RNA sequence: GGCCUGGUAGCUCACUGGUAGAGCGCCGCCCUGUCGAGGCGGAUGCCGCGGGUUCGAUUCCCGUCCGGGUCGCCA
């Protein structure tokens, strides 16, 4: 159909007769001579049409086949901005393969188009160079990961997408079953249980680029269906899994010309919380939180008589007008905090602001030095429960980083967060569906305690550490995993602590526990949030940019119009309204 | 679910208590070296939907739907 790709024409093709096929990207008709930019996936080439009758009938995005002779452009007419800019194709024959209706929006890299229009006509949006490049990158990312994992002896295995509803944390998407009215499949939130079964099955090394489904509210970085690079390995400990994960990460960032220094540094969960206030620190800027509870141990200021007092410094923040300081209060309230206490260190070293007059003389003298604030800085404080206070300060740290231009956008800072707590008090995250006990798993119920805790985690559930690890890139959690429990007795003890009795465990996860009766190997794994990874690599600010056909925030697909109502017939056949079989 | 923000021409967006405008695109004509071609002319609007206030509402008020962001939520 064609002899060359448009974007590949070069001066050495001059004199040869070629056939191109592609779309009319732009038309410059001078009457008598017309120039077409013919675009295919490889790029664009200029076609010269001398026949005005032919040229005048062509419109944007007509699909053409053009045959003619390649020649060097006349003196002074080269376009150095284009790879094909030295040559042009003089059309001898133009065949219209198909016509195009007027476009709903211009297919032009210079024009900003609203997202809804783009998604409704995603097939046109993807003709544009930016979105097309994102699809190309995603394909390369998949290929690079497969190459790394293949080289390390991994098997790619597909697991079911119609499966059993298991309590994993998020809400399940459910699918009615025609053949068993009243019974339902669930779409998997992740292949977690299946990949563990594959380890029991002796496959030893598994991976999958797996689609996962969670019925929760969406965000710019979240979709109802999303993709994970899911990895699981047998006969390994944490260092082995992390090493494989790092190989994948290095291969991916190499695609965009970034060399990730290995090994990637590690930070314990506790240290990350203490220094940055969350478990996904953005390490592109150095600013850290400062603990102040000891400093304020004898404070007269009632607000700071709290189990946790922390601070973060805003360089140059003392110069903020009152209005802006008030805006910080609003900002904090929007995050559910009562406010954000602050002290301004004036250029002459005196402390001002509403909080300052509540502090003792000694505190006023020492606080700037304690938190590392210089004259001209603003110090923000949060006091109260450690978790919520740190969360506020972590958000403030990021906001300061953005407003003060502290974040070096060209940097890529990776870190593993290790030694996370194994349990948290039940009810603290509202997740009571898994068990009835006082404790619930932070990660999931199959995460192993670290070796030193495996025989005594019941003694101090609040301090027991999980054999788990998350990888963070520039403040984004891009992956996480754990070493799993492979001993039945340990699993039962974890369930006990979570208030899941043997009967309940059997009912919820029976098939996994049954499998674990037959010599399960020690195993662990990691999963990467694939959409998010590609988003970061592409420099996009939304997952939707790196998904071929994404959904909107309400789970609506503007292209197909899904979800839709179903017919009465479908409803009946699906058995949606059937009563569940009595037990 | 809470909060913020938007919804006006095909697209991007302005204005206005008195029935609407720009740029681009589209259509027509002109034009032989452009490359975001240029010139002249033209068409295009349930001003998201419903209700209220008003002599009169795209504009003000209430509700609702939809988009985007954010908090909750997402092991």
Image: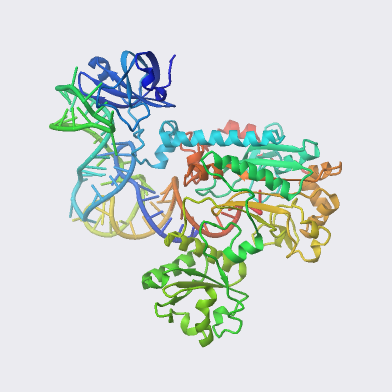
The figure's colour scheme reads rainbow
Q: Is residue A85 left or right of residue B37?
A: right
Above or below, A287 relative to A300? above
**Residue at the bottom extreme of this rendering:** A361
Q: Residue at x 55, y 40 (%)?
A: A254
Above or below, A219 relative to A130? below
Expressed as whole percent of the image width and height from the top left, the position of residue A451 reads: 79, 56
Expressed as whole percent of the image width and height from the top left, the position of residue A276 reads: 57, 63
Q: Nearer the viewer, residue A171 or A160?
A: A160
Expressed as whole percent of the image width and height from the top left, the position of residue A532 reads: 55, 45
Q: Nearer the viewer, residue A257 or A317?
A: A257
Choose top left, top right, bottom left or bottom right for residue A283.
bottom right
Q: Nearer the viewer, residue A371 or B7?
A: A371
Q: Residue at x 41, y 71 (%)?
A: A326
Residue A82 visible to the viewer: yes
Residue A579 visible to the viewer: no
Choose top left, top right, bottom left or bottom right for residue A195.
top right
- Quadrant housing the N terminus of chain A: top left
Q: In this view, does A468 lie to the left or right of A570?
A: right
Q: Which residue is drawn at 68% across and 34% down?
A: A151
Expressed as whole percent of the image width and height from the top left, the position of residue A20 reads: 39, 18
Q: Residue at x 56, y 71 (%)?
A: A290
């Amino acid at each position: 159909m064609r002899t060359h790709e448009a974007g590949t024409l070069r001066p050495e093709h001059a004199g040869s007769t070629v056939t191109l096929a592609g779309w009319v990207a732009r038309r410059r008709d001078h009457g008598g001579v017309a120039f077409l930019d013919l675009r295919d996936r490889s790029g664009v080439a200029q076609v010269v049409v001398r026949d005005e009758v032919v040229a005048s009938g062509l419109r944007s995005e007509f699909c053409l086949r053009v045959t003619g002779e390649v020649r060097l452009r006349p003196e002074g007419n080269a376009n150095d901005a284009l790879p094909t800019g030295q040559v042009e194709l003089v059309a001898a024959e133009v065949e219209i393969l198909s016509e195009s209706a007027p476009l709903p929006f211009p297919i032009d890299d210079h024009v900003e188009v609203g997202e809804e229009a783009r998604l409704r006509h995603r097939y046109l949006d993807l003709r544009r160079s930016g979105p097309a490049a994102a699809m190309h990158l995603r394909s390369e990312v998949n290929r690079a990961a497969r190459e790394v994992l293949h080289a390390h002896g991994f098997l790619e295995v597909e697991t079911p997408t119609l499966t059993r509803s298991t309590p994993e944390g998020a809400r399940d998407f459910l699918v009615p079953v025609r053949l068993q009215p009243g019974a339902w499949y669930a779409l998997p939130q992740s292949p977690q249980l299946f990949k563990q079964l594959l380890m029991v099955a002796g496959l030893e090394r598994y991976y999958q680029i797996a689609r996962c489904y969670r019925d929760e509210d969406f965000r710019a970085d979240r979709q109802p269906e999303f993709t994970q690079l899911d990895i699981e390995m047998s006969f390994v400990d944490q260092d082995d899994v992390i090493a494989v994960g790092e190989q994948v990460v290095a291969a991916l960032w190499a695609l965009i010309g970034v060399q990730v220094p290995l090994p990637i540094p590690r930070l314990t969960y506790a240290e990350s919380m203490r220094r940055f206030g969350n478990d996904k620190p953005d390490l592109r800027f150095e600013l850290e939180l400062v603990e102040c509870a000891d400093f304020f141990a004898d404070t007269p200021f009632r607000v700071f008589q709290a189990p946790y007092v922390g601070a973060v410094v805003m360089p140059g923040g003392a110069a903020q007008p009152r209005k802006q300081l008030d805006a910080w209060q609003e900002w904090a309230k929007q995050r559910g905090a009562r406010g954000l206490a602050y002290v301004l260190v004036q250029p002459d070293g005196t402390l001002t602001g509403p909080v300052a007059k509540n502090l003792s003389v000694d505190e006023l003298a020492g606080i700037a030095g304690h938190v590392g604030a210089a004259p001209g800085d603003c110090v923000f404080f949060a006091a109260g429960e450690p978790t919520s206070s740190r969360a506020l300060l972590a958000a403030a740290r990021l906001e300061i980083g953005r407003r003060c231009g502290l974040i070096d956008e060209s940097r890529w800072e990776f870190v593993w967060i290790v030694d996370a707590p194994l349990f948290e008090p039940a009810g603290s995250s509202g997740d009571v569906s898994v068990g009835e006990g006082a404790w619930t798993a932070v990660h999931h119920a199959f995460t192993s305690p670290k070796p030193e805790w495996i025989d005594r985690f019941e003694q101090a559930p609040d301090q027991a550490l999980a054999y788990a690890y998350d990888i963070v890139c520039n403040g984004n959690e891009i992956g996480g995993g754990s070493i799993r429990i492979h001993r039945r007795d340990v699993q039962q003890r974890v369930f006990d602590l979570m208030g899941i009795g043997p009967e309940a465990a059997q009912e919820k996860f029976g098939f996994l526990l049954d499998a674990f009766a037959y010599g399960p190997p020690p195993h662990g794994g990691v999963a990467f949030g694939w959409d998010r990874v590609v988003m970061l690599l592409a420099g996009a600010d939304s997952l939707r940019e790196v998904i071929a056909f994404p959904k909107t925030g309400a789970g609506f697909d503007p292209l197909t119009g899904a979800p839709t109502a179903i017919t009465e017939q479908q409803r009946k056949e699906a058995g949606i309204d059937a009563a569940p079989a009595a037990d």
